[in-house]
Image (tube, rainbow, N blue to C red):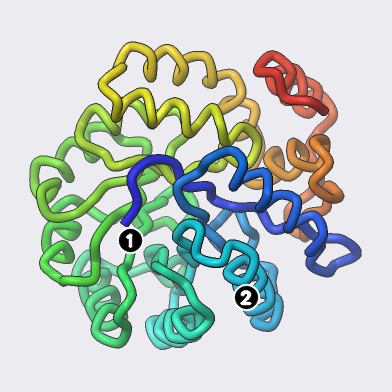
Amino acid sequence: MVKGTSTALITPFTNDKIDFDALEKLLEFQLNGGVNSLVVLGTTGEPATMSREEKISVVQFVVDFVKGRLPIIVGAGSNSTSQAIENALLFTDLGADGLLMVTPYYNKCTQAGLVAHFTKVAEKISLPIILYNVPGRTGVNMLPDTFSTLAEIDNIVAVKEASGNMAQVMDIFQKCGDRIDVYSGEDGLVVPMLAMGGMGCISVMSNVVPSLCVEMTRRFFAGDIAGAAQLQCRLLPLVGSLFCEVNPIPAKAAVSAMGFGQEHIRLPLTPMEDANRIKLFEHMKELGVEI
């Protein structure tokens, strides 16, 4: 679907409502930063604490604002197969270009269950699907053999791999890397995953430094592997700060300091601890971010 940097967009809130003014400013910042696509209602967007009406309003706002200038991928996953299908059909109608489908969480399932779940979803929709493997959040790890089976389905086109397990990542490439695109879901492992054959990243960090994330992937695909690796290392302190507390707590603190709305996150997430916030802001300033 996309080659390069995709931003896993935060959702700005104010007084328990969507802050559309802040969202518009953030979208403009992302477009000016040159990102290759936007991912709406992923983990970073806090969809778990948003109502159906709020999700609809955010997706519609982003689609209307972007106006086809770059692809919009919408998180539609659920731990209920029927709900995932309902979400997917809804976001298709709203103008999404692709769908991000996370593995079922909490009730969990076997690898056979994952195949059955995603097969059923894919049968009901026409948009391209990016599978999302993030076992640290869901308690379910999709194995390489499962990816290989699902890669046979025409509209399952990619995976966002966020297990952090490079041995598993290499196994995915070995088993099905010629049939499915792989995106890094770990901001600290973008260049290593590109080196294995990845097509880009779906990034939390690019909320804060989109142009640097774009430059990192641009350098790699231009053949400047050493330059991309150098930039990856330069960004590692920021990555550490952005994930020192549960995502998107630090990301919300960062973009708020940059002028993109209030630092408002919904319970059970809580505001960033002061000591961590100080380190985060230091690392942002080191990269030239104005706060």
On the question of residue 274 being in view, the answer is: yes
Q: Quadrant of the N terminus?
A: bottom left
Question: What's under tag 2, amino acid-wise?
Answer: Gln
Question: What's under tag 1, amino acid-wise?
Answer: Leu
When the figure is inspected, residue 216 is found, relative to residue 57, above or below; the finding is above
- In this image, 102 relative to 167: left or right? right
Identify residue for label 1: 131
Q: Quadrant of the C terminus?
A: top right
- Numbered disc total: 2
Residue 166 locus on image (x, y percent): 27, 32
N-terminal of the two: label 2 or label 1?
2
Identify residue for label 2: 60
When the figure is inspected, residue 133 is found, relative to residue 18, above or below; the finding is above
Residue 18 locus on image (x, y percent): 79, 67
On the question of residue 205 being in view, the answer is: no
Quadrant hosting residue 16: bottom right
For the point 50% across and 42% down, the residue is: 203
When the figure is inspected, residue 245 is found, relative to residue 121, above or below; the finding is above
Contact? badges 2 and 1 (CB < 8 Å): no
- In this image, 88 relative to 51: left or right? left
> Between 257 and 21, which is closer to the camera in this rendering?
21
When the figure is inspected, residue 149 is found, relative to residue 7, above or below; the finding is below
